[in-house]
Image (spheres, rainbow, N blue to C red):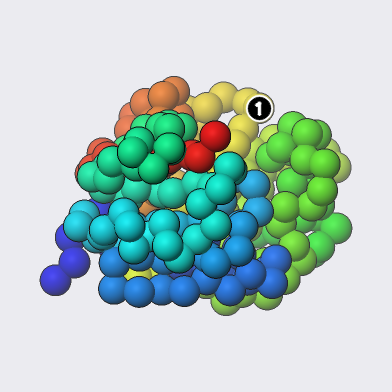
């Protein structure tokens, strides 16, 4: 039986796999890891551990481990320093126990369904700094994935992506330029309405982790991301 952390990890790996496929990159899922033989898009890992005992040598032989390679050490158990990697950041897996639907959520939040709106959403997510499109229109055609956003006139003030897989909903790419606490509360309410009685998972660090925990999330385990400089 999988632990809470292992379920969150596998949900996140399925999200990364879905995302990479929209860029025509097909990853490989093994018993211990998810890997991509070719370099993944910026901000996405080339390898993800699925168990605490995934061997480092097996991961690195399946990826392009040259400069720019990143590994999501999902249980913070690897030591990739001997291979020349450096720690990029540490974070916490988080979980919200199956919030009840609110029958209304936050009226300003809704699903993004049109490619043109996805472009506007991405511009808000990247704060106008994304030189090339990160989120392809094909993302909107994946049944397990829903892009949510809080509309602000013609743009978006806040948003997140939900991936429903492995019995949980993974929330990723959360952003807001408004009140962080309110945005997290609305994100939870919106996801709960879309996926009633399903636990919500994800990972965060710093101020976002603190805000999420004040809205009902709790930390369930550490993770670490390594980068080859």
Circle 1 SS class: loop
Is residue 23 visible from the viewing direction of this image? yes
How far across and down, in percent of the image, does residue 220 sit?
23, 44
Q: How many marks?
A: 1
At horizontal 62% and vertical 32% (from top left) the residue drawn is: 176
The answer to whether 31 appears left or right of 102 in the picture is: left
Residue visible at 50% across and 40% down in the picture = 228
Dividing the image into 4 quarters, which one contains the N terminus?
A: bottom left
Image location (x, y in percent) of residue 103: 47, 57
Rendered view: 217 above or below 207 = below
Residue in the image at 31% along x and 54% along y: 56
Q: Nearer the viewer, residue 165 or 105?
A: 165
Give the residue at x 59% y 43%.
68
Of the pair 74 and 11, the residue shown nearer to us: 74
Question: x%, y% of residue 160?
Answer: 57, 48
Query: Mark 1 highlights which residue?
Result: 177
């Amino acid at each position: 039986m999988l632990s809470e952390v292992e379920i969150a990890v596998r949900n996140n790996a399925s999200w990364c796999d879905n995302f990479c496929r929209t860029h025509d990159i097909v990853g490989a899922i093994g018993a211990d890891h998810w890997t991509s033989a070719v370099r993944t898009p910026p901000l996405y890992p080339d390898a993800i551990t699925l168990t605490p005992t995934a061997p480092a040598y097996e991961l690195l032989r399946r990826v392009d481990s040259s400069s720019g390679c990143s590994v999501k050490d999902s249980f913070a158990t690897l030591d990739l320093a001997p291979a020349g990697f450096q720690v990029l950041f540490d974070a916490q897996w988080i979980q919200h126990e199956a919030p009840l639907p609110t029958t209304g959520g936050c009226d300003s939040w809704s699903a993004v369904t049109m490619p043109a709106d996805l472009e506007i959403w991405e511009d808000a997510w990247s704060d106008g700094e994304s030189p090339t499109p990160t989120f392809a229109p094909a993302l909107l055609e994946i049944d397990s994935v829903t892009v949510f956003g809080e509309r602000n006139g013609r743009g978006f003030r806040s948003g997140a992506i939900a991936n429903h897989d492995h019995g949980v909903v993974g929330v990723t790419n959360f952003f807001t330029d408004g009140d962080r606490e309110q945005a997290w509360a609305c994100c939870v309410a919106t996801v709960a309405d879309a996926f009633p009685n399903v636990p919500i998972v994800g990972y965060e660090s710093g101020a976002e982790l603190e805000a999420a925990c004040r809205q009902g999330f709790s930390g369930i385990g550490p993770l670490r991301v390594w980068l080859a400089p």
